[in-house]
Image (tube, grey):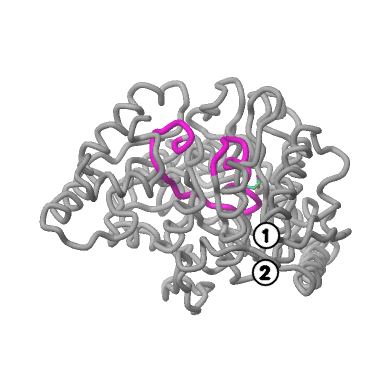
Amino acid sequence: MTIIKKTAVEQRKALLNKEISAVELLDLTYEQIDKNDEQIGAYNSLTKDEAYETAKKVDEKIAKGEDLPLMAGIPLALKDNMNLKGSYTTASSKILENFVSPYDATVVTKLKENLVPIVGKANLDEFAMGSSNENSAFKIVRNPLNLNKVPGGSSGGSAASVAGFEATVSLGSDTGGSIRLPASFCGITGFKPTYGRVSRYGLIAFASSLDQIGPFGRCVEDVANLYEVIAGYDKHDSTSLNMPVGDISASLKQDINGLKVGVITDLLQEGVEEDVKKAILNSIEVLKSKGAIIKDIKMPTLKYSIGIYYILATAEASSNLARFDGVRYGHRTTGAKNLLEMYNKSRAEGFGDEVKRRIMLGTYALSSGYYDAYYKKAQQMRRLIKEEFDKAFKDVDVLVSPTCPTTAFDIGSRNSDPLAMYLTDIGTICANLAGIPALSTPVGFDKEGMPVGLQIMADVLKEDILLKTAYNVEQGIK
Ligand code: GLN
């Protein structure tokens, strides 16, 4: 197998053994991009200067025999809604098409400190709004496993880059499932940490009370290692948690004998494809064989998650996106006759249809006549979801479900029906509403060879238990 198809753990070994240099690893990654990315569309732009500068530093360190940070030299794709100084940071929107970032997001600062080469900026649904990556203003992303299928969204470029060997790991953001869904559709592992674990400073905001940055990788260990690089308190983010991250790698490979696993029965019923169900039930058998105690858990409030989410997320988006006014940065229309016309036209020209739909929905939900009926109700319901999780975690250590009721669908098959598209996230949104950590890892394939993802959720700050469970599933499935 060529080195670019290997995991970060294996690539690190090759770097340390001097079988390959970090610069050569990058060369091979860019060769793969040159060959395939015109079709896949995973990248909006490449950041070669940045990447090579870092890779050279890694090679110097190796030559001198110095200690190497865990992810040093491993090619990474960065979702294009995170700021990297000097790079185009577009959120896949026309309104930011020519925006060059003047600063680094905190995750980027951490990547730089850990000498992780940033290969390029990964394509996404405009402002991270979508489930299929068909909403990018520039180009769609195709699933590297089958080019007629969607890669999932909104972090479709981040997932496709890893699945298509155009990066070894990547970062995405997850507001309602945007890391877990594309991980599931592309057959890789994707992880959304506890809300506040990873700083959002420098992430272009969609819905601030739900947004969280997290890693993608070819195996659970890569994801755990990258999580350790990016997690931790940040004074620039007022919602950042000032709590120790702990030593995840120390517990990752421990056994799960006696671990209590809850199966969310509500997410395994109607609408779940047969092949998905089979793979999930098989992974539950794997957990059982490793000594886990399995229990059925009913969570009847979860069926309201999508409704709650589309009120709260759109409300927050309508407020967050008010800053794109054509005045301070981003696209400005030409020839407007007055200020109001300038605002209106800049926004009308700059935002795509889905973004406009969300701004309108959110503005409506927040308007004085409807605030109590919609926004306040949704906040109250969000509380009930959290309470349902609190109750479940009194009984079990982790919860499992399909990440998505279906495998990757055909390009174009859902984008004329926003409601059908919104339903894709039925299994993932609840974790954002409750702020809990959640991960998707591949556990099988459907008849067409498209991957199925198992979602594992744990209580707040229990990333160690979650990742250990995922590691055991992965080892058992192989
Ligand atoms: N698919 C969901 C949406 O369209 C979630 C997106 C996300 O997590 N960024 O809003």
Q: Residues within 10 Å of mark 2 (few under 14, many from 20)?
A: many
Identity, as a three-letter code, of the amino acid under mark 1 = Met
Q: Where are the magenta residues, as a range?
A: 161-188
Residue 163: x and y in percent read 48, 35
Label number found at residue 457: 1
Number of disc labels: 2
Q: Is residue 177 magenta?
A: yes
Three-letter code, disc 2 = Asp
Residue at left 59%, top 54%?
472
Rendered image quadrant of residue 125: top right
Residue at numbered disc 2? 459
Is residue 338 visible to the viewer in this orientation of the structure? Answer: no
Q: Quadrant of the C terminus?
A: top right
Q: Nearer the viewer, residue 134 or 444?
A: 444
User: Does residue 202 appear anywhere in the picture?
Assistant: yes
The quarter of the image holding the N terminus is: top left
Mark 2 residue element: loop
Counting from the top left corner in percent of width and height, residue 293 is at 76, 62
Q: Position of residue 238 (x, y in %)?
A: 50, 74
| Residue at (72, 37) in percent of width and height | 421
Q: Which mark is residue 245?
A: none
Residue 145 falls within the magenta-colored stretch: no
Report the Cα–Cα distance between label 2 and label 1: 7 Å
Q: Give how far across and how far down residue 49 sits, in percent.
A: 21, 42
- The one nearer the camera, 115 or 435, is 115
Residue at 37% from the left image edge and 40% from the top image edge:
98
